[in-house]
């Protein structure tokens, strides 16, 4: 089994410096793309590989790039690495950035070349101190080696790269909110259209890609689209960083072929449930995805299959709910997070999320009423897709609506017994 | 919101120099405002009304406009904080793995709740969203240092290292 993304990552030794990375084949894709391919050929190759965005939305990456106008009417274009990773339960980009920072920088250079961007930013979340240190050093090394700056490898192509560290706000992960944050504004999402590919950072064409997405680029350039598709037996191409947290024997992160089953992930890689705990459900891809439960154990973890099971692959990092954790408390914790992180721009989300949170808190405290279930259900509809300005509120409703479906008796118990049965 | 200005505080030469670098990277001065807030907070610990006024003036924006940005972000401190800020993850994986026990222990030991600072100014305790290390939950960050797989009985030793 090939693991291109993590092959050079070893938690027992420091991340590779540029020389060692080059010795292992690093930066070959920059040589290849810049010296022997046109930007259009790079974009086409990535599009053909069927690499889908690994930040959660799952859109074809090459296709996204192809929307950037290439007629040179705008001399400035931007390529941005979205390294804001702040979705609760998600910790995959940290491994990639701390483990092999050059891999993403290499991917960024090739991606920027494809859209002919001359300025690139890494939007890194504040808490990733070690990653910040390593990235700063790796960027300096890349400049010194002539992979960044003016006239890269004598090709006439120029690219600057800056590291921006955030000041903590989940909504910055939304790509248009991220642009506002980079412009020194409140990070509220922007209306689309215009899409960032046409008018993004400072009004210029901009591509925002997730860390894991960018880390795949060098390997696709080096090995081709068919190789990438061949990495997985399922309907989605490539490998995926899957993670598991919660009461399992071996919580962690693994690079596996796209489309392994939930059973394999939990039982084999995560080592099964801890002694004395039963599996009750899991959010397959971070805090804003619907629960999957026991009957979904054999669902394949790819974009299509998880959607068919009523959830989303999201970030591919799974949070397990066990039988001794209160599902109402679990969902309350999630809604507390989303209520706090609502940017406040649109009323349904700004008002609806705190209301949702209060209802759940009351239930936890034994003050739940029968009509609260209808109220919660109403919120899942009014805060659902199409009713709010961005996807934060609908995302917040995904774990709630599925908890109401699968764990209804636990909600009922709270209301009938006038207490939390787990406390 | 009314911003009180007792007396304007000048930016130090060092702060100015750092802010100027950021201004040089963006098309207009205002766009550097988050970086400027970070720089001044780094030097002074927090953003007082006076600092806010000074930064706003330097970036040619109104204090109200800058405050609307400053108050949006979780880690721009508009109130004084202690010498060491404890950010305890209260998100979902840490919830499942028992961050509440850690919180109880911190409260008992430091006699403060979330949002408060010890009377000796040594610690401020704040809740923080997921620290991105959920496979090692529960986790917290103290003065930029990450602690993972926390148990309540490790806390005394950890806290002792911070003066
Ligand atoms: S849904 Fe929430 S986060 Fe999104 S724009 Fe509306 S208030 Fe902001
Ligand atoms: S939930 Fe606490 S580190 Fe992710």
Image (spheres, coloured by chain):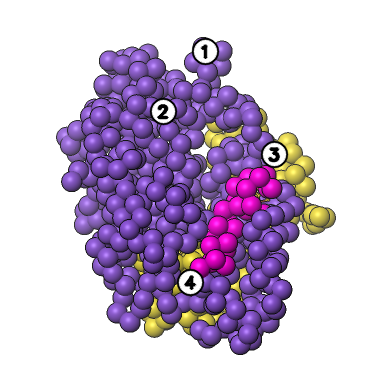
Label 3 and label 2 in one chain: no
Magenta: main secondary structure: helix
Please determine whether, in this image, residue B95 is positioned above or below residue B34. Answer: below
Q: Residues within 10 Å of mark 3 (few under 14, many from 20)?
A: some
Secondary element type, mark 3: helix
Q: Is residue A207 visible?
A: yes
Residue at mark 4: B95
Residue found at x 54% / y 66%? A405
Residue at mark 2: A62
Circle 1 chain: A
- Nearer to us of marks 2 and 4 is 2
Q: Nearer the viewer, residue B63 or A155?
A: A155
Chain shaded purple: A
Residue labelled 2 has its Cβ within 8 Å of some atom of ligand 1? no
Image spot of residue A307 (x, y percent): 45, 49
Image spot of residue B88 (x, y percent): 50, 69
Residue labelled 4 has its Cβ within 8 Å of some atom of ligand 2? yes
Q: Nearer the viewer, residue A321 or A375?
A: A375
The earlier-in-sequence mark between 2 and 1 is 2
Q: Residues within 10 Å of mark 4 (few under 14, many from 20)?
A: many
Residue at mark 1: A72
Which quadrant of the structure image shows residue A215?
A: top left
- Nearer to us of marks 4 and 3 is 4
Residue at mark 3: B58
Give the extent of the magenta segment.
A383-406
Label 2 and label 4 in one chain: no
Image spot of residue A350 (x, y percent): 71, 56
Q: Where is the N terminus of chain B found, in terms of image quarters?
A: bottom right
Image spot of residue B48 (x, y percent): 69, 57
On screen, residue A226 versus residue A199, left or right, reads left
């Amino acid at each position: 089994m090939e693991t291109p993304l993590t092959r050079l990552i070893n938690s027992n030794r420091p991340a590779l410096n540029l020389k060692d990375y080059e010795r292992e084949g690093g930066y070959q894709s920059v040589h290849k793309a810049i010296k022997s391919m046109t930007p259009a050929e790079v974009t086409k190759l990535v599009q053909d590989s069927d690499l889908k965005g690994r930040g959660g939305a799952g859109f074809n990456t090459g296709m996204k790039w192809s929307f950037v106008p290439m007629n040179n009417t705008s001399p400035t274009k931007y390529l941005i690495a979205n390294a804001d990773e702040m979705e609760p339960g998600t910790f995959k980009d940290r491994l990639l950035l701390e483990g092999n920072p050059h891999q993403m920088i290499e991917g960024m250079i090739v991606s920027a070349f494809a859209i002919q961007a001359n300025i690139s930013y890494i939007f890194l979340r504040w808490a990733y101190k070690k990653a910040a240190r390593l990235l700063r050093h790796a960027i300096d090394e890349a400049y010194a080696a002539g992979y960044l700056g003016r006239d890269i490898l004598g090709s006439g192509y120029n690219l600057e790269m800056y590291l921006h560290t955030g000041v903590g706000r989940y909504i910055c992960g939304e790509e248009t909110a991220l642009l506002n944050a980079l412009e020194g504004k409140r990070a509220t999402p922007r209306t689309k259209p215009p899409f960032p590919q046409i008018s993004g950072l400072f009004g210029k064409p901009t591509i925002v890609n997730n860390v894991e997405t960018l880390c795949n680029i060098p390997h696709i350039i080096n090995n081709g689209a068919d190789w990438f598709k061949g990495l997985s037996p399922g309907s989605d191409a490539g490998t995926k960083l899957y993670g598991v947290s919660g009461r399992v024997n071996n919580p962690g992160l693994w690079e596996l072929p796209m489309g392994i089953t939930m059973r394999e992930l939990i039982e084999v890689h995560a080592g099964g449930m801890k002694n004395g705990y039963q599996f009750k459900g899991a959010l397959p891809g971070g805090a804003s995805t619907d629960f999957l439960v026991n009957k979904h154990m054999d669902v394949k973890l790819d974009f299509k299959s998880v959607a068919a099971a009523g959830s989303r692959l999201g970030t591919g990092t799974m949070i397990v709910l066990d039988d001794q954790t209160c599902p109402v408390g679990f969902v309350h914790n999630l809604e507390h997070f989303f209520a706090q992180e609502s940017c406040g721009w649109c009323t349904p989300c700004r008002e609806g999320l705190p209301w949702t949170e209060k209802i759940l808190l009351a239930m936890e405290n034994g003050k739940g009423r029968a009509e609260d279930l209808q109220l919660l259900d109403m919120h899942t509809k009014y805060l659902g897709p199409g009713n709010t300005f961005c996807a934060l509120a609908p995302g917040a409703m995904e774990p709630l609506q599925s908890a109401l479906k699968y764990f209804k008796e636990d909600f009922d118990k709270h209301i009938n017994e006038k207490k939390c049965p787990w406390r | 919101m009314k911003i009180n200005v007792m007396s304007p505080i000048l930016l130090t030469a060092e702060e100015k120099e750092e802010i100027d670098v950021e201004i040089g990277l963006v098309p207009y001065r205002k766009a550097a405002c988050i970086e400027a807030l970070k720089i001044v907070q780094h030097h002074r610990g927090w953003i007082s009304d006076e600092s806010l006024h000074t930064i706003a003036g330097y970036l040619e924006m109104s204090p109200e406009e800058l405050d609307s940005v400053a108050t949006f972000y979780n880690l721009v401190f508009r109130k004084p904080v202690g010498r060491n800020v404890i950010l305890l993850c209260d998100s979902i994986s840490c919830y499942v793995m028992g961050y509440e026990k850690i919180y109880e222990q911190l409260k008992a030991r430091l006699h403060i709740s979330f949002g408060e600072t010890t009377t000796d100014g040594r610690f401020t305790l704040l809740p923080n969203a997921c620290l991105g290390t959920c496979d090692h939950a529960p986790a917290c960050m103290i003065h930029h240092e990450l602690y993972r797989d926390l148990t309540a009985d490790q806390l005394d030793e950890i806290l002792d290292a911070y003066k």
